[in-house]
Image (cartoon, rainbow, N blue to C red):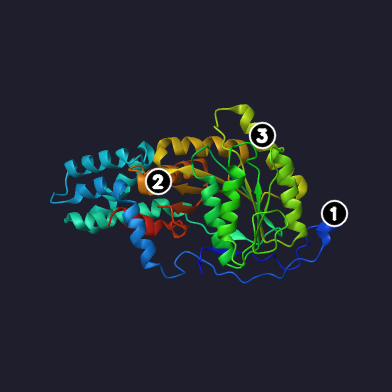
Amino acid sequence: MFSFFRKKTPAPGAPADPPASAASAMPTAPAVPVASAEAGGATPDPGWLARLRHGLRKTGSSIAAVFVGTRIDDALYEELEAALLMADTGVGATRVLLDELKRRVKEAKAGDPAAVKALLADVLADQLAPLHKPLEVGEGAPTVIMVVGVNGAGKTTSIGKLTRHLAEGGCKVLLAAADTFRAAAREQLAVWATRADLPGAGPAAGAVGQVQIVSQEGADPAAVTFDAVSAGRARGCDVVIADTAGRLPTQAHLMEELKKIQRVIGRAHAGAPHEVLLVVDGNTGQNALAQVRAFDAALGLTGLIVTKLDGTAKGGVLAAIARWGVEQGRVVPVYFIGVGEKLEDLQPFNAREFAEALLR
């Protein structure tokens, strides 16, 4: 079992969510115990750590090279600054990292490059710590997750991997194929639903199993999402995940469609969506931060999934995202990162693991 999320228990005495219809008033399945992944909790998987180090090698190699056979002087810090900027850490985050590193080096009286490198890992882990937060499911019965992002970021694939993890954790999941006009989008999600389903449910609406899917060819995306959320409530699902069409944040009329879906989800289930996740491609570097800003302004993001970090030298953008969140007083956490195509290559983000893998 993958232990990467936490089942949220309603507060004692909290009122139950009122049914939207007679169908939604049907008895729901009993809560399933789910393992948690609190900071410092579960023992790291050695296989995952190895894949993470391998996946981050393009980003980390240039930074680690600064500490090979050199003295601790201004030239080292200048080289490190250049390496961090090349990794798309951003000017603000780079400045904060270097200032804190210099302070700790002076405090520790570190004179060995290896010691300074270890201190940098500590500083980076601290800077990334605000992004470290487990995904919680169980609120709202079902928890409704809306997934957004630009075309090609890996939304549908990430949904498939996330669904499998949820199913292995004992959650009953329903998928809403709300990307209704992209060629093969419904089919792609159906394939993932079949792969993710433990008892073997098929990719048709109404299938009996751990994973189900609601889809309508050419239908209005908001209508499909409304039907899926309503069905998730009626069937006692733990989680409903809505896949949406890729949207460029610069195209206002397309972003309005996402806002419409978000509003319709709220009508189908009060308080939903409980999570609005943005999937960003790590290869895009600073453009990923621009996407976070734009989608957050439009939808109010609750979390991120950063994909394809194995194919980029720009993984430092996570530090830029963390710095942006701190500066605005509201950090959008990174729930998951992806470093490959396999199911197990999507795992929860851990600030310490990431920093140590980057500077191995």
Q: Quadrant of residue 192?
A: bottom right
Give me the residue at 60% from left, 47% from top. 187
Residues under labels 1 and 3: Cα distance? Answer: 26 Å
Q: Which residue is mark 2?
A: 319
The three-letter code of the residue at mark 1 reads: Ser
Query: Residue 73: x, y in percent?
Result: 16, 45
Q: CA distance from mark 2 to mark 3?
A: 31 Å
Residue at image coords 59%, 69%: 34
Tell which circle, 1 or 3, labels the residue nearer the N-terminal end: 1
Question: Which residue occupies 59% across, 43% down?
Answer: 185
Residue drawn at 42 percent across, 70 percent down:
43
Q: Is residue 220 above or below residue 272?
A: above
Instruction: Looking at the image, tell me whether mark 2 or mark 1 is earlier in sequence order.
Output: 1
Q: Secondary structure at mark 3?
A: helix
- The three-letter amino acid code for the residue at tag 2 is Ala
For label 3, the residue is 257
Pointer 1: what residue?
Answer: 21
- Tell me the amino acid under the disc marked 3: Glu
Position of 96 with respect to 167 (left or right) is left
Q: Residues within 10 Å of mark 2 (few under 14, many from 20)?
A: many
> 284 or 197: which is nearer to us?
197
